[in-house]
Image (cartoon, helix red, strand yellow):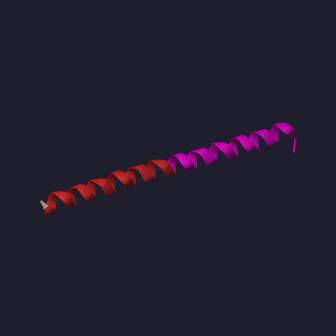
């Protein structure tokens, strides 16, 4: 492969990796909010 092709492949790989990590963080953040909401409802029910 030429140097330019290698750089493009690496750039695409890094971009895909960052996208996957970003999606995972958003999913974990949303899950955390859902769990917090469920915990709040449980606490309200015990009062």
In the rendered image, the residue lying farthest to the top is: 4
Q: Residue at x 19, y 59 (%)?
A: 43
Is 7 located above or below residue 25 in the figure?
above
Q: Residue at x 67, y 44 (%)?
A: 14
In the rendered image, the residue lying farthest to the left is: 47
Figure disc tally: 0
Q: Residue at x 69, y 43 (%)?
A: 12
Please tell me in which quadrant of the rendered image residue 36 appears: bottom left
Q: Which residues are magenta?
A: 1-23
Image quarter (top left, top right, bottom left or bottom right) of the N terminus: top right
Name the foreground residue: 47 vs 17: 47
Place of residue 8 in the rendered image (x, y in percent of width and height, measured from the top left): 75, 39
Place of residue 32 in the rendered image (x, y in percent of width and height, measured from the top left): 37, 53
Place of residue 19 in the rendered image (x, y in percent of width and height, measured from the top left): 57, 45
Q: Residue at x 71, y 40 (%)?
A: 11
Name the foreground residue: 15 vs 44: 44
Is 46 located above or below residue 26 in the figure?
below
In the rendered image, the residue lying farthest to the front is: 47
Instruction: Tell me: 44 left or right of 35.
Output: left
Image quarter (top left, top right, bottom left or bottom right) of the C terminus: bottom left
Q: Main secondary structure of the magenta part?
A: helix
Name the foreground residue: 33 vs 2: 33
Place of residue 3 in the rendered image (x, y in percent of width and height, measured from the top left): 85, 38
Name the foreground residue: 29 vs 1: 29
The verdict on residue 47 being magenta is no
């Amino acid at each position: 492969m030429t140097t330019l092709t290698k750089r493009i492949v690496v750039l695409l790989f890094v971009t895909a990796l960052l996208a996957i990590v970003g999606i995972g963080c958003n999913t974990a953040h949303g899950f955390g909010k859902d769990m917090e909401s469920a915990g709040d409802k449980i606490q309200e029910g015990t009062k």
